[in-house]
Amino acid sequence: MNAPTSALVAQRPERLRLVGQRRQILAIMHQRLMFGMLVYAGVIALIVARILFLAAFGDHAGRKVGITALIPERGDIVDRDGQPLARTIDAWTIGMHPNKVIGDKLDIARALARLMPERDAATYHAMLRSGRNFFYLRRRAPPELVQAVNALGEPGLSLDREPDRLYPQTSLAAHVIGYTDVDGRGNAGIERAFDERLSDPATRSEPLTLSISSRLQQALEHELLAAMTEFSAIGAAGIVMDIHTGEVLAMTSLPQLNPNAAGQGSEEARFNRATLGIYELGSTYKPFTVAMAMDSGVIKSLGQIYHCPNQLQVAGRTINDTHPFGRSCTVAEIMKESSNIGTAQIAAQIGSSRQREFLDKMGFLSPIAIELKERGRTLNPGKNWNQIETMTVGYGHGIAVTPLHLATGYATLFNGGIYRPPTLIKVDRTHPVSAGRRVFSEDTSYKMRSLLRLVVTHGTGRKADAPGYRVGGKTGSAEKYHNRSLMVTSFAGVFPMDEPRYVIVAMLDEPKATAKTYGFRTAGWNVAPVISRTVSRIAPMLEVRPDKKREANLAEVLPFVNATER
């Protein structure tokens, strides 16, 4: 066998050396590529960090808003018919960068004072000389103002676009809808209660549909504002509610508030009297006492007799009536004439324990169960719930709740006796009707219809009647805790009373007497007419037809009313 030649032996090490060099070159190229990618990623990270830093702490550091450009959009809020109540728009913002101004500062200050007179030239001049990075001059600026500022040609004045919350119905249902702060977060009302839902990208694409009807809301607000003005009241509240679903169809608090400029509104205007304000119910509470007595077996007939003297002395206190009987009277007469003396005796028979139990079932001892955060804490006798407290609570004194509590109580009383928490969200397949809990029997709920219709046809609530719509309800007038010379007047009603569907509550805070009311300032004179006018306007919208041939069964109560009083 021949030995291999020297040339053949030398080839193998040469190939190995070339392969090793190629691998080394590839390794170096890979290292350089990785280094280049790391450098590139580092540069990108620095750019992103710089952008975020400038947004938060750079030229905009003087703003109240922080990272304005990163304010998220919010979902729309619409009424039950799809009418927009709140939406996000792209708005113009005018700002000032004092350190970038190159023109004559005094001339610029004078020009700004002419275009935006909310500040004078001296103030603008001081801002220009302050050395600060940034000032807001106008948010949600109109196009003509933006054009005029742009025409000044000053680079130190900025014109930016940013998302802004718009309430196209202005003050309509403002306390229900609420408003947002400068950072775009919900600050009151539905905006606050559903802040996460409205700002979450996963849910904000679908509008939040409220139970409120803009048409009903407008009618209620118009009539309440007219009454508030006529009687020089400091405030008012009103509610329209579906008694079977718990949907709040309209709810207002006055004075009015424009959520587009909520920061300019007074503290009084921002206060929600319907859910946050608590007031003594006055005589609007008396139907609850009678219903409690019926369910407890205390009252067995609306003709049941009570002794009703001109005054009733109890535990060193005197209970009086506006229209004293000075004789025996029936349950029907007690309700018709709104007798404190008669109702106090009925409450005493019920007893404090059963009274508290009913109140608790109705939600009167707790803040109202509604989606809003603005909910007032109720007041009641607490540990001092003795006989005299039971009697005064029986006719609506010594207990303070919100107007929405009152509306919910009447819904419970006339829907068959089932308590359902009120809701501001439209009831549909995604938000079904609450099962609720039983408070009163169906029989008691039915018998109360004729009793409260009697109050409107023959009693203190005559001015609340709306021809053809069979309104039933109760007036209430109560003195204020802090000043007994001031009053809160209210009316709680239901229509149509022969087949109850809707509750309506109206309240005036500190109404004054007028010549038209002959010097009286009680509910029958100032709030009851609001109910009549409002029901006449909204009943057709709710497809309740006027029918003078239909009526609640007054034959159940009229036999128990003195013939001279019919």
Image (cartoon, grey):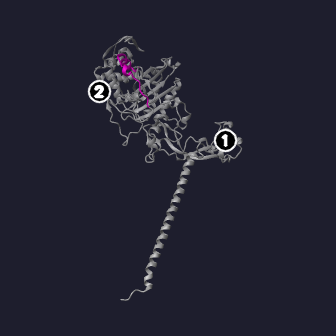
Residue at image location 48% in from the left, 66% down from the top = 30
Q: Earlier in the sequence, mark 2 or mark 1?
A: 1
| Left or right of residue 225, residue 398 in this image | left
Q: Secondary structure at mark 2?
A: helix
Q: To which quarter of the image does residue 118 belong?
A: top right
The spot of residue 561 in percent (x, y) is 35, 17
Q: Looking at numbered disc 2 in the image, what kind of residue is underneath it?
A: Asp
**Residue range (magenta):** 375-397
Residue at image location 51% in from the left, 24% down from the top = 233
Q: Quick check: can you spot residue 150?
A: yes
Question: Which of the two residues, 47 or 547, is positioned nearer the viewer here?
Answer: 47
Q: Looking at numbered disc 1 in the image, what kind of residue is underneath it?
A: Leu
Residue that carries the numbered disc 2 in the rendered image: 443
Asked if disc 2 and disc 1 are in contact, CB closer than 8 Å, the reply is no
Crowding at mark 2 (Cα within 10 Å: few <14, some 14-19, many 20+): few
Question: Which of the two residues, 416 or 4, is positioned nearer the viewer here?
Answer: 4
Q: To which quarter of the image does residue 500 belong?
A: top left
Crowding at mark 1 (Cα within 10 Å: few <14, some 14-19, many 20+): many
Residue that carries the numbered disc 1 in the rendered image: 128
Determine whether 261 is above or below 299 in the image: below
Residue at image location 55% in from the left, 35% down from the top = 263
| Left or right of residue 350, residue 168 in this image | right
